[in-house]
Image: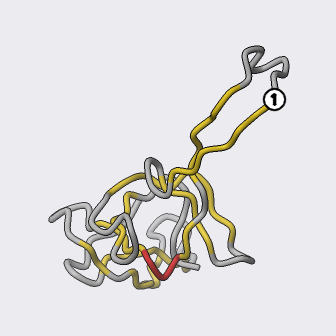
Amino acid sequence: MKIKKDDKVIVIAGNYLGKTGKILKVYPKKNRVIVEGVNIRKRHTKPNQQNPQGGIVEKEAPINVSNIMILDPKTNEPSKVGKKIIIDEKSGKKRSARISKLTGEMLP
């Protein structure tokens, strides 16, 4: 999976089409992610220590990775993610970095 926590993404399919948000959690085995402010579900809860009143709690639910695209840091447009091998100048070791296919900019 090429998506990581704290990446800025845009929803490209489904009920929340066009909404942007930050990834809060990634489930690589299920191929799903939780995006901030997307796919909000209501859950009825009993009173407990964290919520002594109980009531209805709104919470983000996971969506499929195929329904999101990462936002390019330079242009703020949807982009595919690629990998590039970079040689570290100090140690001389190879490491891979994620890049945006749209501009070639490195992703954080």
Residue 15 horizontal/vertical position (percent): 38, 68
**Left/right of residue 52 with respect to residue 12 in the rendered view:** right
Q: Is residue 18 above or below residue 14?
A: above
* Residue 33 sits in quarter: bottom right
Residue plotted at (36% across, 68% down): 11
**Amino acid marked by disc 1:** Lys
Look at mark 1 in the image and give the residue it sits on: 46
Front in this rendered view, residue 20 or 17: 17
**Splitting the image into 4 quarters, where does residue 62 fall?**
bottom right
Seen as rendered, the residue at the extreme left is 75
Quadrant the C terminus occupies: bottom left
Residue 30 placement (x, y as % from top left): 71, 76
For label 1, the crowd category at 10 Å Cα-Cα, with few meaning under 14, some 14 to 19 and many 20 or more, is few
Examine the image and state in which quarter residue 107 appears. bottom left
Residue shown at 57% from the left, 39% from the top: 58
Camera-side residue: 70 or 85?
70
Residue at the image position 60 percent from the left and 57 percent from the top:
61
